[in-house]
Image (cartoon, rainbow, N blue to C red):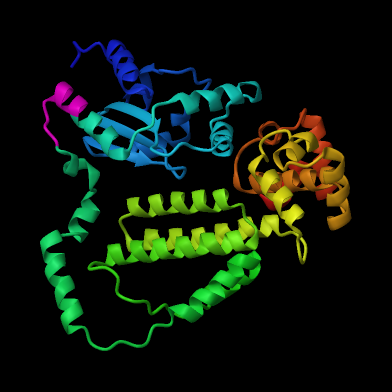
Amino acid sequence: MKSIDYAYLCRRLADLSGIPVRVLEGENLAESSFPVRLPRDPVSVCLSEILAVSDHVGYHMTPRFQCYGIVRRDELRLVFGPTAQIPASDRQLRDLAFEADVPKAETEAFVDGMKQLARMPLETLLSLLCAVNYLLFGEKLELEDVAIRAAEQEAIKANVEKRRTAKVYEDAPQEAPHNTLQLEEALMDLVRRGDSAALRTWLSSAPPVRGGLIAGDQLRQLRNMFIVSATLASRAAIRGGLAAEDALSLSDAYIRRAEQLGTQSAIMNLQYNMILEFTEQVEKVRRGAAPTRLAVDVANYVQRHLSEPISTEAMAKELYLSRTWLSARFKKETGMTLTDYILNEKTEEAKRLLRYSDKTASAISNYLGFSSHSHFVRVFRKYAGMTPNEYRERHG
């Protein structure tokens, strides 16, 4: 192993795969090669999770559904990625840049570099890892050895489950009638209205769901129910005003995540978070008792571009309206100026980041597209009634 030129290996593998390749010795970076320019290595955001992968050949899927592949021997690791089959949005990549502490001046270069990385499905990445593992260490692994994790291998035994499924359908006792329709209607109405406070109250005392049997094992049953819930929630959110592309992309992302989970608890918790996120997204675009179509369109645009400087001219162009008409009409319909609305939404996002992240106020200012830190402080004080540091001390 000491005779292997890892610097050369990283370069060749990065060129071949089109994704970054690194060699880690313990927690320390020994070598790395990138097929594109990235101002910061995104692996820093999830390094602890990658180090926790104990399999000789394994992977880590991030909350944004970007995948890292790992080939490990003792303290030596080759780490490939990130890659994904579905490209991330600009907003998601800017969020990643923020978490990776990419300087403001380099954020666009980071986003552009991430877009240029090769995209591949998980199976392709795992096949590459198996080949590298064999060439380096002589261990032959097949795709099924690494694609299905131990917990799921234990839970899903094909022949046994087929027989058990048949028996369930043939001999199942009469169960209590389904109650899913009533619960579904109540839940989706909260999503459609964007009433997150009522949703939390409802979920805290909701009756148990008695749904139909749609799979032969418990994990598949939960995943199938999750897919149904994601589909219903996305449609309810669209009816509530959330942009269709945003709602459908969010649904797809959650479904892919659910398919990677291997425990009942993990899937149920993800489902709770999914329903809540859809509701909160609708809540953001339905500010006001009866938002107009224009107000909803503006809210969707602002949410997609929160991490950028937002100009009325660019917004009007995307909405196929004149800038002066858009400003005047929005003020007439909502009672507030576009500038006030945009800066208030940026302030609300800043509050969330100050409470739930460890990023500095300066980093948050850069991420939200403010021209300077002093401008951010002035805006925050105007809309929040205190400085960012005071807010963090009070709510952190």
Residue 222 sits in quarter: bottom left
**The N terminus appears in which quarter of the rendering?**
top left
- What percent of the width, then of the height, locates residue 298? 73, 48
Magenta span has 137? yes
Q: Which residue is at 56% across, 76% downward?
A: 186
Q: In the image, 133: left or right of 114?
A: left
Task: Please tell me which residue lies in front, 282 or 313.
Answer: 313
Q: In the image, 32: left or right of 54?
A: right
Above or below residue 350? Residue 287 is: below
All told, the count of numbered labels is 0
| Residue 106 in view (yes/no) | yes
Q: In the image, 21: left or right of 362?
A: left
Above or below residue 205? Residue 190 is: above
Q: In the image, 317: left or right of 12?
A: right
Q: Which residue is at 55% across, 27% downward?
A: 111
Q: Which residue is at 23% across, 39% downward?
A: 55
Task: Please tell me which residue lies in front, 22 or 3.
Answer: 22
Task: Please tell me which residue lies in front, 286 or 150.
Answer: 286
- Residue span colored magenta: 131-141
What is the magenta segment's predominant secondary structure? helix
- What percent of the width, then of the height, locates residue 217? 24, 67
Magenta span has 325? no
Q: Which residue is at 38% across, 80% downward?
A: 210
Task: Please tell me which residue lies in front, 135 or 172.
Answer: 172
- What percent of the width, then of the height, locates residue 275? 52, 62
Above or below residue 271? Residue 129 is: above
Above or below residue 21? Residue 345 is: below
